[in-house]
Image: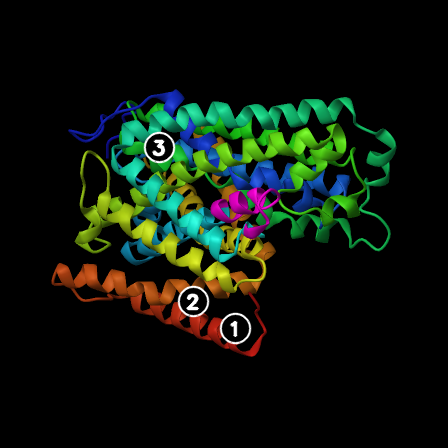
Amino acid sequence: MSTSTNAAPATGVRTVGVPTLAAVVVGSMVGAGVFALPGRFAAETGVWGALVAWAVAGTGMLTVALVFQNLAVRRPDLDAGVYSYAKAGFGEYLGFFSAFGYWASACAGNVTYWVLIMSTLGAVFPALGAGDTVLAVALSSVGLWVFYLLVRRGVREAAAVNRVVTVAKLLPILTFVLLTAFVFDPAVFAENLSGGAGAPPLWEQVRATMLTTVFVFLGVEGASVYSRHARRRQDVGRATLLGFLSVLAVFASVTVVAYGILPRAEIAALDEPSMAGVFEAAVGPWGAGLVAVGLVVSVGGAYLAWTLMAAEVMFVAAKDRDMPRLLARERKDVPVGALLLTSVVVQVLLVVTLASEDAFGLALELTSALVLVPFLLAAGYGLRLVLRREGYAPGERVWRRDVVVAGVATLYTVFLLWAAGPSYLLLSFVLYAPATILFALARREQGRRVLEGREVVIFAVSVVGAAVGVWALATGAITL
């Protein structure tokens, strides 16, 4: 096995360096979630709970980021990150689950972006409502296909746009943090410390915020997913850490300063994007306008980054013959087949929002839940790799540190599954089980049996989980 950290990408693949890869990480992480953080956290916890939640989530996701960094260095032959690590560690079928789950998560996440944009514009144009009216869906659909055409022009062009957008969208967010800090009210902040009378125990408050933290941290794996375009594999790890630490500081700041502006109950009652309501209370109506502009730019950039990553995962899975060969079609270094399928599914989900009571909340939590299994498999493979010392020189001292990091990352992803609760895991199975049709088509194209060995057991578990999920939806035990 090659352990070179300077392995060249495949012939004909355009290469990018640390700035572009870091922009992909930041661009994919700083999207819709940051603008909803004040309201989402205030609905569940006070200042102490928020600080503990960010400490837990920051530490946990940092270990996950370090695992991705280590895997990029130790296994430079693996492309597409989350998917390829799951396949290398646990076989083709679980690798397929990881690819599909990550891709489905990205599709659901892209829906939240359009809903939030239209909801923000709805403050000026009431016909857009909360982003789920017929007009809102129609305008979102136009935007969806405009982005499709942009990305289809070429990955280098899309990445260049993403770098510019990443810088532009951070300015309003940093302005929010700095100006709210100047009008910060210590008395209001003190009242929000514990969460108020009748608040649940601190640990329950922290647990309730976990899916939100997962949502906003999605994208930490962005450079790894896009690794086949890196000039050097070391650049993947550096970009991941640089992007993660920058974004963690922004997320924690946005959440904490809001508690010094309004009482917790008032923050929780704000319409999305709640950051706009907090900023308006702090500096006046122009603050809400600035946040609205920043949100549109931010979400546009995040949508671009996630469209790139989602298509990349399905493309590489198809190249590895774990997805139908139709998804392996490529033009100008763009996976056009996977890109088209991604856009079609996002379009379908946009139409589904017309029947949803809380389209943004559902898509946010479903996005987080779907990505937990791929994250768990990647972290598990990272632990397996260091325990077997794959890619390590004899006596290499960093090995002990990597064992601890990979172990914590694996435990953290297990904790996230527990914190999410059974409802979203069952909803995930409802999507995973029928998706096996794609796996079956790929196997048939190769003249192989659809399921082999332990894959039959994994499929049976997914079918049982899907059946329970459908029953829970039908009986109202799980509501959308």
Measured from the top left, where is residue 287 in percent x and y?
A: 67, 30
Viewer-closest of 224 and 475: 475
C-alpha span from label 1 to label 3: 40 Å
Viewer-closest of 232 and 251: 251
For the C terminus, give its image quadrant.
Answer: bottom right
Mark 3 lies on residue: 72
Mark 1 lies on residue: 473
Do callouts 1 and 3 mark residues in contact (Cβ within 8 Å)? no
Residue furthest left in the image: 447
Does the magenta run of residues contain 285?
Answer: no
C-alpha span from label 2 to label 1: 10 Å
Mark closer to the chain start, 1 or 3:
3
- Residue 239 location, quadrant: top left
C-alpha span from label 3 to label 2: 32 Å
- On screen, residue 336 versus residue 98, left or right, reads left
Mark 2 lies on residue: 430
Measured from the top left, where is residue 206 in percent x and y?
A: 69, 48
Measured from the top left, where is residue 462 in percent x and y?
A: 40, 67
Q: Residue at x 88, y 33 (%)?
A: 187
- On screen, residue 450 versus residue 52, left or right, reads left
Q: Nearer the viewer, mark 3 or mark 2?
A: 2
- Residue 257 location, quadrant: top right
**Part of the protein shown in magenta:** 113-127
Do callouts 2 and 1 mark residues in contact (Cβ within 8 Å)? yes
Q: Is residue 103 above or below residue 151?
A: below
Tell me the amino acid under the disc marked 1.
Answer: Leu
Q: Secondary structure at mark 3?
A: helix
Residue 405 in view here: no
